[in-house]
Amino acid sequence: MSAERDSCTAMRERIHELFDGDDPLTLPADVVQHLEICPACAQMHADLARLRDLLRHAPAEPLPARTLDAVWAATTGTRRTRRRSSRPR
């Protein structure tokens, strides 16, 4: 049973890596074979595919400036310099 669990753990990591890459629609043959015999991994793959599709079709809405500032500070450790509007006054 442990070997089966280890196999699924490794396969799930590969599936995540495939979704992180450029072409998750093209699956290697060993991944396809595993998905055909493992309902749990097949469900995870289906869930990730659905999430990817939902995110791709979600409307892109601009974030408020305060949120952008907080994200910028959290990820870079610096303050974000806001650009001045190029609109005439």
Image (tube, rainbow, N blue to C red):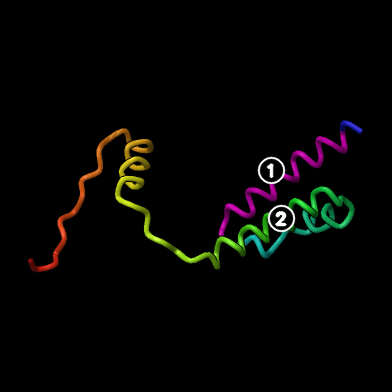
State the image coordinates of residue 36 (x, y, percent, origin top left): 86, 57
User: Would you name the residue on which mark 2 appears?
Assistant: 47
Q: Nearer the viewer, residue 39 or 63?
A: 63
State the image coordinates of residue 16 (x, y, percent, origin top left): 65, 48
Q: Within 10 Å of the Cα at label 2, are there few (<14), some (14-19), or many (20+) other Cα atoms?
A: few
> What is the quadrant of residue 51 in the picture?
bottom right
Residue drawn at x 87%, y 50% as measured from the top left:
38
Q: Nearer the viewer, residue 56 or 17?
A: 56
Give the magenta-colored segment's residue range.
Answer: 3-22
12 displayed left or right of 35: left
Residue 13, label in figure: 1
Residue drawn at x 82%, y 55% as measured from the top left:
35
Residue drawn at x 37%, y 42% as measured from the top left:
71
Q: Nearer the viewer, residue 85 or 30?
A: 85
Give the residue type that dot 1 points to: Glu
State the image coordinates of residue 49 (x, y, percent, origin top left): 67, 60
* 67 to 26, vertically: above or below: above
Query: In the orientation shown, which residue stands out farthest toward the top?
Result: 2
Quadrant position of the C terminus in the picture: bottom left
Residue drawn at x 37%, y 54% as measured from the top left:
63
Q: Which badge, 1 or 2, is on the more N-terminal residue?
A: 1
